[in-house]
Amino acid sequence: MTLPDLTPTGSPLPDMAPDVGALVSYLEYDPLPAIVLDPQYQILAANRAYQRQFGGEGQAHVGRRCYQVSHHYDVPCDQAGEHCPMKRATESRGADRVLHIHHTPRGPEHVDVELRPIIDTRGEIIAYVERLATVRGASARPSAEGLVGRAPAFNEAISALQRVAPSTLPVLLLGESGTGKELFAHALHEASDRAQRPFVVVDCSGITETLFESELFGFEKGAFTGATSRKPGLVETAQGGTLFLDEIGDVPLSIQVKLLRLIETGTFRRVGGTEIQRADFRLVAATHKPLEQMIPAGQFRADLYFRISAFPIHLPAVRERVEDIALLADSILARIASAGHGSPRKALISPDALALLRAYSWPGNIRELRNVLERASLLADDGVIRPGHLPESLRRETMASPEALPATAFVLPRKVSDAELARAAVESGGKRSELAARLGMSERTLYRRLKALTDAGKV
């Protein structure tokens, strides 16, 4: 079966086969942006939602290749080192879903892509339908708030979050201290059907055992000395919304059994009360502790662990997302300036200082990065953070690891592949100085490598 040409607006011509024509017509009523592709990656049709969200002045999407529009690539995604949903869907003859960073009129954005093949009566794939949903809870550009990142490890966590958000499954966020668990939990809440209801945080490490039960479940008047009136607990406060148990590994054993009952039955009683209360919340828990190892030691209940870990998500440490450090630093400095912690003007980072930040191991993760940048921005009188403004311990560690910093301080602590460099060059929009600073290399080195890629036809 051959698909005919389309009008410039993406509408099918009268002689289009009824099955595909009906599909294109249906897509106009889809609230999500959607396109129809042929097996050669060509966009055959685009609904109005796609044109509104991904269209641009003077840009016609129909007739172009999907990878040209979404990534500004000259080759399909898999040839540029990325997951190509069409290739996977072709191999499996079923749907494939992936989180990509797409070019949009607003700049690079995280987009949840779902692609399904259209199979004719002979069993041949004649086209594909691709639906796209922009991820609102994360930014691929510097942002003064929320989650920020573009590294593969970060995107993997965001992709998992997007998949589980519409469900009611309990989610367990696993990661080192300082990796942004509360921000991830809040992004999960915002992406769920409970976004308009409360998001309640319980700091399990900050509540003493004697107060834990009353804080969680509330208490009745006269339940104990000082209980002069009834007080609702955090479970009641989260009614209809999300209850985030931060550092759940610190919950006392005596409370774990009551927490398990709450999760299993959806009921609880206030301290000093006899009336059964109904609970309605989405549970999200987080910990930096190895809960599985704590079970044999009798420090954490196995039954509670299996209840809270229905959908675990690993949050990457900063050292697992080195390519995000420049983006994180830019965002943190913007937040520092807007919060009034020093000069209202956002500080800049010199390339050699950025190279040191990228070479450091960051045991305290994003929390430590923020502390370092807050101090450095106060010391940078001219608004430019240089190596001397960074803590001595950080400089000492990076300088003590010659494999982390090559001969010149402008070179990355790890080699950037040709595919990564080509992708970064396309996404930078031609701003060579900014790209060099973000990648931690000199403009001269960047120019030489880009020229070599251009001569080889890779950029």
Image (cartoon, rainbow, N blue to C red):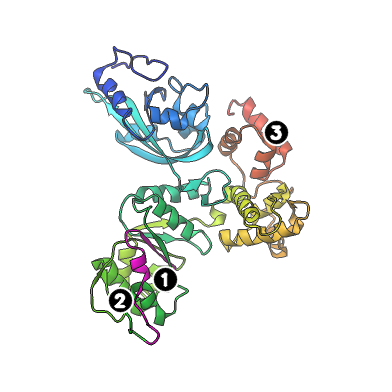
* Among the two numbered marks 3 and 1 on one chain, the one whose residue lies closer to the N terminus: 1
- Where is residue 123 drawn, in percent x and y? 24, 25
Residue at (28, 17) in percent of width and height: 1
Q: Could you say which disc has been placed on residue 345 in the image?
A: none
Left-right relation of 332 to 183: right
Mark 3 vs mark 2, foreground winner is 2
Residue segment shown in magenta:
225-247
In this view, the residue farthest toward the top is: 15
Cα separation between marks 3 and 1: 51 Å
Whether residue 279 is visible: yes
Residue 76 seen by the camera: no
Does dot 3 land on a helix, a strand or a loop? helix
Residue 320: percent from left, percent from top: 54, 53
The residue under label 3 is 448
Residue lying at 56% horizontally and 43% vertically, measured from the top left: 141
Q: Amino acid at mark 3?
A: Arg
Q: Which residue is mark 2?
A: 270
Residue positioned most to the left: 121
Alpha carbon distance from label 3 to label 2:
69 Å
Q: CA distance from mark 1 to mark 2?
A: 23 Å
What kind of element bears circle 2? loop
Which numbered tag is attached to residue 249? 1
